[in-house]
Image: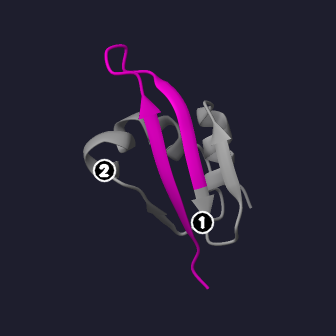
Amino acid sequence: MKSIVFVDLEVHATKHTVLDIGATNDRGSVLHSPSMRDLAKFLQGHDYLCGHNIMAHDLKYMKEALSQPRQG
């Protein structure tokens, strides 16, 4: 079965830095962290990524996490 993760970033309005990351998946796991490294680890093994305003806003901040090599 395909898996999905839902992500939302909170970004500082003027500094454009990530203040917080919230994510959950269809398995009931939850991430709450300011770390892109934690997000990259959380995203592993998921087939789909979903989020409010993800294309116009969050994705540009997530590129680092999404470009990490996938393991196993």
As helix, strand or loop, the secondary structure at mark 2 comes to loop
Residue 22 within the segment the image draws in magenta? yes
Residue in front for this viewpoint, 37 or 22: 22
As helix, strand or loop, the secondary structure at mark 1 comes to loop
- The quarter of the picture where residue 13 lies is top left
Q: Mark 2 or mark 1: which comes first in sequence?
A: 1
Distance (Cα) linking label 2 and label 1? 19 Å
Residue 10 within the segment the image draws in magenta? yes
Is 41 on the left or on the right of 12, as rendered?
right
Above or below residue 35? Residue 31 is: below
**Residue at image location 65% in from the left, 42% down from the top:** 32
List the residue tagged with mark 2.
53
> Which quadrant of the figure contains the N terminus?
bottom right
Q: Amino acid at mark 1?
A: His
Residue in front for this viewpoint, 1 or 32: 32
List the residue tagged with mark 1.
46
The disc at residue 7 is none
Per the rendered image, the range of residues in magenta is 1-23
Above or below residue 16? Residue 57 is: below
